[in-house]
Amino acid sequence: MERNSHKKILALIALTVFGAVYAAAQTAQQPQPGNKKASVQARKKAQAHINQNMSEMHVSGRMNEPHHVLALAYKENIATFARALRDQAQAGSLSSDFARAAAAEIGRSLDQVDDHHREHVKTMSADMRSKMAAMMKEVDMSSSRLKDAFKVLEKDVGEYTLNSKLIATDSDEILKRLDDMPKMHQPE
């Protein structure tokens, strides 16, 4: 039993290393633009409002708050594992151990994002929370949609026989939900 645990831990470590290498390789790729002009304009308008709030956070030092930084890192981790899972599924070489380990890491990272987001909000003054209320509401809605997409992925990787095409689609949906979230800029 202990030997099996060690194998699982080593597999998770290997998956984490693979994900980090994959993320580094993907930084040069540009995201694909949306097809609907109205949707793009609405997203740009919302992002402009969020950017204004982010500027206020940056000026107040909130961008460097440790919980904010960690939440962003875990969000990037979700994207890394979702891309790795999608790419393995599209290649047709999807191992059930790999798929379940990647999904488990996505789920763990989602929990960590929530925990650190809650702790970050606790560090804000009442005035800052009121200024950021609209953005935080949008973040909460986006987070809910992301969690719903994860539940679908989690169900599909839990099946006895994996459907690679379905898992690739589920992973793409997670990446889409991440892209739809308000952009929380990394601290400088």
Image: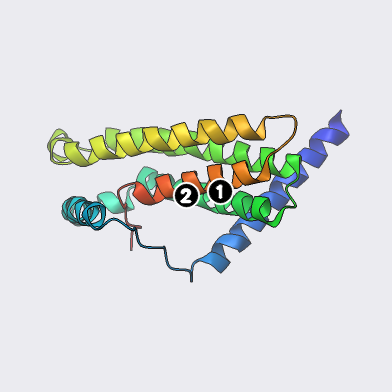
Task: Indicate the quadrant containing the C terminus: top left, top right, bottom left or bottom right.
Answer: bottom left
Q: Position of residue 166 (x, y in %)?
A: 60, 41
Q: Identify the residue position indicated by label 1 in the image.
A: 82
Q: Which mark is residue 175?
A: 2
Identity of the residue drawn at 53% across and 32% down: 152
Q: Which mark is residue 101?
A: none
Q: Earlier in the sequence, mark 2 or mark 1?
A: 1
Asked where in the image residue 99 lies, by quadrant, the reply is top right
Identity of the residue drawn at 67% across and 30% down: 158
Q: Nearer the viewer, residue 157 or 130?
A: 157
- Find out whether the residues at labels 2 and 1 contact each other: C-beta distance under 8 Å: yes
How many marks overall? 2
- Please, is residue 93 above or below residue 126 in the view? below
- Please, is residue 120 above or below residue 155 in the view? below
Q: Nearer the viewer, residue 26 or 170?
A: 170
Give the Cα separation between the discs numbered 2 and 1: 7 Å
Question: Could you tell me the amino acid type at mark 1?
Answer: Ala
